[in-house]
Image: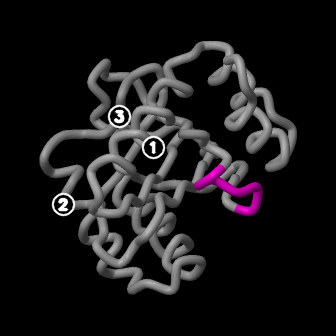
C-alpha cells in the first residue's frame, strides 16, 4: 500500500508543540477529527486506550500511534515533527520527535498493509534523517511518500 493514498500534504505538521504524550495525542486526534468529521473525544479515547496496551514508540525517536475505527472506509495518516522530543515510553527508551498518527478501518487487510507501510518507511534511517532535516511541511510530506527509501 502506498502511503500517499492515505497521507496528504495538509496532514504533515512541522514543529508541533507537545508538553507530553497525552496532550500531543489529544491534539493530533482533534486535528484528525476535523478532517474526518468524527468525534475527537472518541478518537482520542481509542488512541490512548491503545497506548495503554503498550507504547507505540517503536524506537529511533519514532512513534506510530494507531487504532481502528468502524466509521472509516480507508486509512488516514497524519505526521508530526515535534518542536522538542518528548518521552513516549518507547521500546528503546529514547525520546520521540517524529509521530505518525494512523487511523484505520476495521477491515484487517487495509489495517495491516497501511501500518506495515508506515513502519517500514519509518524504520529507514534515510527517511527519518530527511524528516528531521525538512525545512517545511511540504518537505515532510515528500520525505514520507518518496519511493525507494
- Kind of element beneath mark 2: helix
Q: Which residue is drawn at 47% across and 31% down?
A: 62
| Relative image position of residue 45 (x, y in whole percent) | 25, 71
Q: Relative to 140, does residue 28 appear above or below in the rendering?
A: below
Give the side of residue 51 with respect to residue 135, left or right. Answer: left
Q: Which residue is label 3 attached to?
A: 57
Left/right of residue 115 with respect to residue 4 in the rendered view: left
Tag 1 secondary structure: helix
Query: Which residue is the extreme one toward the top?
Result: 125
Stretch of the chain drawn in magenta: 5-10
**Which quadrant of the structure image shows residue 82?**
top right
Give the mark, 2 or 3, whose residue is nearer the N terminus. Answer: 2
Q: Residue sitting at 74 percent across and 24 percent down?
A: 130
Q: Mark 2 points at which residue?
A: 49
Q: How far apart are marks 1 and 2 (CA)?
A: 20 Å
Q: Which percent across, then down, holds residue 56?
A: 31, 39
> Is residue 38 shown left or right of residue 142?
left
Cβ–Cβ under 8 Å for marks 1 and 2: no
Amino acid at each position: 500500500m502506498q502511503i500517499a493514498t492515505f497521507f496528504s500534504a495538509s496532514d504533515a505538521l512541522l514543529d508541533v508543540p507537545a508538553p507530553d504524550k497525552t496532550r500531543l495525542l489529544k491534539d493530533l486526534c482533534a486535528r484528525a477529527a476535523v478532517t474526518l468529521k468524527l468525534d475527537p473525544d472518541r478518537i482520542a479515547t481509542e488512541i490512548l486506550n491503545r497506548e495503554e496496551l503498550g507504547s507505540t514508540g517503536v524506537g529511533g525517536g519514532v512513534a506510530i500511534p494507531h487504532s481502528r475505527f468502524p466509521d472509516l472506509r480507508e486509512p488516514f495518516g497524519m505526521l508530526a515533527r515535534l518542536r522538542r522530543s518528548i518521552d513516549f515510553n518507547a521500546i528503546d527508551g529514547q525520546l520521540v520527535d517524529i509521530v505518525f498518527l494512523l487511523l484505520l478501518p476495521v477491515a484487517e487487510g487495509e489495517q495491516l498493509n497501511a501500518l506495515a507501510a508506515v513502519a517500514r518507511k519509518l524504520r529507514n534511517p534515510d527517511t527519518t534523517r530527511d524528516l528531521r532535516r525538512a525545512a517545511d511541511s511540504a518537505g515532510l510530506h515528500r520525505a514520507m511518500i518518496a519511493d525507494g527509501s
